[in-house]
Amino acid sequence: MANTNYPSATNNPESRPERNNRTNKNLIIGILAVGLLGTWGYLLYDKNKSGEKIASQTTQIANLDSSKTEVQHEFDNALARLDSVTGSNNNLQGQLADRQKDIDAKKAEIRKILNDKNATNAQLTKARNMIADLNGKISSLEAEVAKLTGENQELTSANTSLTQEKTVLQQNLATTNIEKEELSKTVDVASTFSASNIQVTPVNEKRNGKEKVSTTAKRVDKLVVSFDVENRIAKSGATDMYLIVTDPTGKVITDQGSSVLNSRTDGDKQFTSKVAVDYVQGQRKTIQYPIRNSDFITGNYKIEIYHNGFKIGEGVRSLKKGGLFG
């Protein structure tokens, strides 16, 4: 076999340690790589878990916010119903006062939960239950409002009916009063006496007390007016007759000063005498009344008789001028 000058690997004392160093280095690098990969994997896994936790928490927060919003909406609706019920009927104010303390307590507790940013599902559930109880009380109030409204409508209807009946009664009463007034006027007019058999007798009074009829003006001391009165409607009792005696010059003879009669047809008239008559219903009564004057003159004397403001009769008496020996 031939000999060679190249050293063999087995025979090189430096080649073996170098190879061992490389192997160890590669092994360390591999271990570090595996560790690094494991760390990355753990970090990635942990990050995924954290993301899932955050997502879960975000979902929970969103669900809580949604539930809280729903509870707030339910609470607002309940308050709106309560305001509507209590504000629409004043009759409920007294009844509501008895329940107001309990309602106010529930409202305060519900508001406290809704104002809590960290309110839990349990707290929101409690608030929802209290709102349901509040709505129950409101429903009871609504039922009472409906009942009161119905009763009020019945009262309004009854009041309207009574008002209409009152109006009809007032109209009937007004009509009755008008008819009564007209009837009263009719009776008043109908109760006016009628005068008949009117006579005017000129009388001369003698010194011896005897009386003699005389038509000579200068001898007449009085005119005796006589007439009959009668009325079947006028009630028994005292009534007044008015005599107006006008002399030939147109002047009214008066024995009671400037007395004035307010007649219904002829206006105000000065009268001579007012004669009181005591009358019995349905009976004819004869009236006599003397008209005195200090100086009777020649001419026609007009006598008018008034009762109840109406002229009921008149007559004329002439006095003549005396003769040579009159």
Image: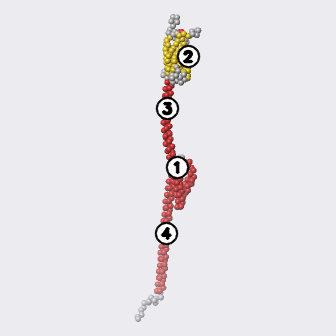
The kind of residue on which mark 3 rests is: Thr
Are there few (<14), some (14-19), or many (20+) residues within 10 Å of tag 1? some
Which is nearer the N-term, disc 1 or disc 4? 4
> Which quadrant: the N terminus?
bottom left
Closer to us: mark 1 or mark 4? 1
The kind of residue on which mark 1 rests is: Glu
Q: Name the foreground residue: 127 vs 240.
A: 240
Q: How is the image coloured?
A: secondary structure
Residue designated by label 4? 49
Report helix, strand or loop for mark 1. helix
Q: Which mark is residue 176?
A: 3
Looking at the image, the residue that sits furthest to the front is: 283
Q: Position of residue 71 (x, y in %)?
A: 51, 57
Residue designated by label 2? 255
Q: Is residue 59 above or below residue 158?
A: below
Which is nearer the N-term, disc 4 or disc 3? 4
Q: CA distance from mark 4 to mark 2?
A: 138 Å
Report helix, strand or loop for mark 2. loop
Are there few (<14), some (14-19), or many (20+) residues within 10 Å of tag 2? some
Q: Is residue 76 above or below residue 325?
A: below
Q: CA distance from mark 4 to mark 3?
A: 102 Å
Q: CA distance from mark 1 to mark 3?
A: 46 Å
The kind of residue on which mark 4 rests is: Lys
Report helix, strand or loop for mark 4. helix
Closer to us: mark 4 or mark 3? 3
Q: Is residue 228 above or below residue 176?
A: above
Closer to us: mark 4 or mark 2? 2
- Tell me the residue at 50%/31% (across/down): 177
Are there few (<14), some (14-19), or many (20+) residues within 10 Å of tag 3? some
